[in-house]
Image: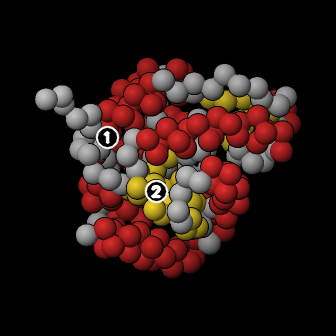
Amino acid sequence: MSRQIKFAERVIDFNRKLKYSGKLPEGFQVLNPYMDNPETMDVMQKFYAKFYNDNNQRKFIIGINPSRHGAGVTGVPFTDTKRLDTVCGIKMHSAYTHEVSSVFVYDMIESFGGVKEFYKNFYINSPFPLAIVRKAKAGKWLNANYYDDKKLFECVSEFMIQSLLQHISMGLDTSEVFILGKKNADFIRKLNDEHKMFDKLTVLEHPRFIQQYKSKEKQKYIDKYIIALSRVVAEAI
């Protein structure tokens, strides 16, 4: 009898093969942390082996694309090196990053019941799972979202569709998907209308938006996340 491939192995294999070789508009670049830093591959594998070494059917939480200070360094969505170490117990020696979205996500995870309980039920990734940067004035590179530029979206949309389909093929529950960010949801909804990937789309405010513009109401948004996510866990029992 052949051994069933664990969910962790599926994700690790996806990340190992992850490469964007398509076109980009002038002034944009894609950063691949797995190619740029060997330790990123190492800590990413440790993370999934620790929290995803099973065959649970998880709900999919969809971000935009990784931050260069979060998954753009650690290879773990919404996880900077600080929370990778202090909360997940995986130390990264070659980098130290603080990412504002990671702060909200891990405060929310703590309210949900902690990392083991959360990651047992949910899988987070992005339709474009690599960091995108754009060249600003004075040659400085800044984080960019896949939807910031019409030409950029046109360049990456096919890659995004394939990425989402690959994630679904890992065994994710497609009956309801959680999308972070209203603008992100507009674009995912358009792709979903064309390719019928998910039955129901539930939109939650993006962690960065909350941290940056609604920090005084942070607990309200944590509660909103917990209510939405706890509902689908209860329904699955």
Q: Is residue 165 above or below residue 196?
A: above
Q: Nearer the viewer, residue 177 or 209?
A: 177
Which quarter of the image is occupied by the C terminus? bottom left
Residue under pointer 2: 174
Could you tell me the amino acid type at mark 2?
Thr
Q: Is residue 83 visible?
A: yes
Q: Residues within 10 Å of mark 2 (few under 14, many from 20)?
A: some
> In x, y percent, where is residue 33?
53, 28
> In x, y percent, where is residue 45?
34, 31
The quadrant where residue 200 appears: bottom right
Q: Secondary structure at mark 1?
A: helix
Q: How many marks?
A: 2
Q: Secondary structure at mark 2?
A: strand
Residue occupying the point 75% across, 48% down: 147
Residue occupying the point 54% across, 49% down: 99
Q: Is residue 22 above or below residue 73?
A: above
The quadrant where residue 185 appears: bottom right
Q: Is residue 217 above or below residue 121?
A: below
Could you tell me the amino acid type at mark 1?
Phe
Q: Is residue 93 visible?
A: no
Q: Nearer the viewer, residue 53 or 201?
A: 201
10 left or right of 162 in image: left
Marked residue nearer the N-terminal end (1 or 2)? 1
Residue under pointer 1: 7
Compute the Cα span from label 1 to label 2: 16 Å
Which quarter of the image is occupied by the N terminus? top left
Colour mode of the rendering: secondary structure
Residue occupying the point 40% across, 28% down: 13
Q: Residues within 10 Å of mark 1 (few under 14, many from 20)?
A: many
206 left or right of 232 in image: right
